[in-house]
Amino acid sequence: MTDWNGKPYHSLDYYLKETFGKKVYKLALDGGMTCPNRDGTLGTGGCIFCSAGGSGDFAAARRPSMAQQLEEAKARLKNKLGDRDVSYIAYFQSYTNTYAPLPYLEELFSSVMDFPEIAALSVGTRPDCLPQETIDLLARLNRRRPVWVELGLQTVHEQTARFIRRGYSIDVFYDAFRRLREAGLSVIVHVILGLPGETREMILETVKTMGQLGVDGIKLQLLHVLSGTDLGELYQKEPFPVMELEEYLDLVADCISLLPPEVVIHRISGDGPKRLLLAPLWSANKRLVLNSLTRRLKERGVYQGCALQPSSPIHFPGSVTEP
Ligand code: SF4
């Protein structure tokens, strides 16, 4: 396949329309959880690029109810959608959304699934916060409605992982990935393009590895250096090179060429808060970036998977063979 409804890659938009037969929108919800990389369990500063902020207290008591959050999030889309018949993905994005006791998670996620307009549940988390009992819970919920688990891997390279203070090794990721897939859950992996110290080859290796692994979806996120983060502070003291637009366009085209056609590309550009953006400033113009990328893919004749060589899938210690 070389065309997904006019696009040379398997976009999330295409996947959602094919799967649910109508437009589906994400509603960002606050599960009231924190992150072990912020609450002192692993560290207090968080990942070097993270703008989540705060001390990371367990905030369950402070958050509005799910019903209230859903209504507010839907109201924000109302102008755009009018009375169109749409469904929603309940998206727990910020912090680590499995970092809580099991009964709390069960109550939280089940309550969301009780709303008929919720077509799927998407849970952003860390691979080191997925004990088997949590995976079993997500698998049970997955029988009611699709459950996606989003893992912020960023890179397969250990030296970069240490620099960004990710707080877990690649083996932890592989183990969680294997257990999630054995439980029948969809896994979406976040990768950052342009982390300091990474060459183009290193970035492509990360993306290629995810393709070989058989992830269900991937987010290709351009590194945004944001004010208020440790990376931002580093950049302001001693600016390091960030990606130029031209370089980025060719890199994304190469990433797309290396991903198997069935992998859904959930994000292809950055999506950071503009008011905090320190670099690269061109990335604030999302329309320019997307239009330039469309042109570049066309000029180069790139489509998803076009550079794939037949190769064996990756095997991990203790892994089962993927079909
Ligand atoms: S794991 Fe996520 S929430 Fe926690 S510090 Fe890193 S980026 Fe921030």
Image (spheres, rainbow, N blue to C red):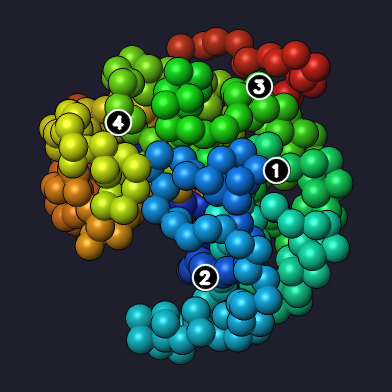
User: Which residue is pictured at 74% across the width and 66% down the height?
Assistant: 109
SS under mark 4: loop
How crowded pointer 1 is (Cα within 10 Å; few <14, some 14-19, many 20+) is rated as some
Quadrant containing the C terminus in the rendered view? top right
Q: Nearer the viewer, residue 11 or 78?
A: 78
Q: Earlier in the sequence, mark 3 or mark 2?
A: 2
Q: Earlier in the sequence, mark 4 or mark 2?
A: 2
Question: Amino acid under label 4?
Answer: Gly
Position of 198 with respect to 43 (left or right) is left
Residue 233: % across, % down = 26, 43
Q: Earlier in the sequence, mark 1 or mark 4?
A: 1
Q: Nearer the viewer, residue 158 or 180?
A: 158
Return the mark for residue 194. 4
Return the mark for residue 287. none
Which residue, given by chain and number where applicable, does mark 1 sit on?
129
- Some atom of ligand 1 lies within 8 Å of the CB belonging to the residue at label 3: no
Q: Is residue 18 above or below residue 80?
A: above
Assess whether mark 2 and mark 3 are in contact (beta carbons under 8 angstroms): no
Q: Is residue 234 above or below residue 110?
A: above
Residue 73: % across, % down = 49, 79
Assess whether mark 1 and mark 3 are in contact (beta carbons under 8 angstroms): no
Question: Amino acid under label 2?
Answer: Leu
Which residue, given by chain and number where applicable, does mark 3 sit on?
171
Which residue, given by chain and number where applicable, does mark 2 sit on?
27
SS under mark 2: strand
Res. 116 in view: no
How crowded pointer 3 is (Cα within 10 Å; few <14, some 14-19, many 20+) is rated as few
CA distance for labels 3 and 1 = 14 Å
Q: Nearer the viewer, residue 117 or 34?
A: 34
Indicate which label's residue lies in the foreground, 2 or 1. Answer: 1
User: Which residue is pictured at 45% across the width and 56% down the height?
Assistant: 52
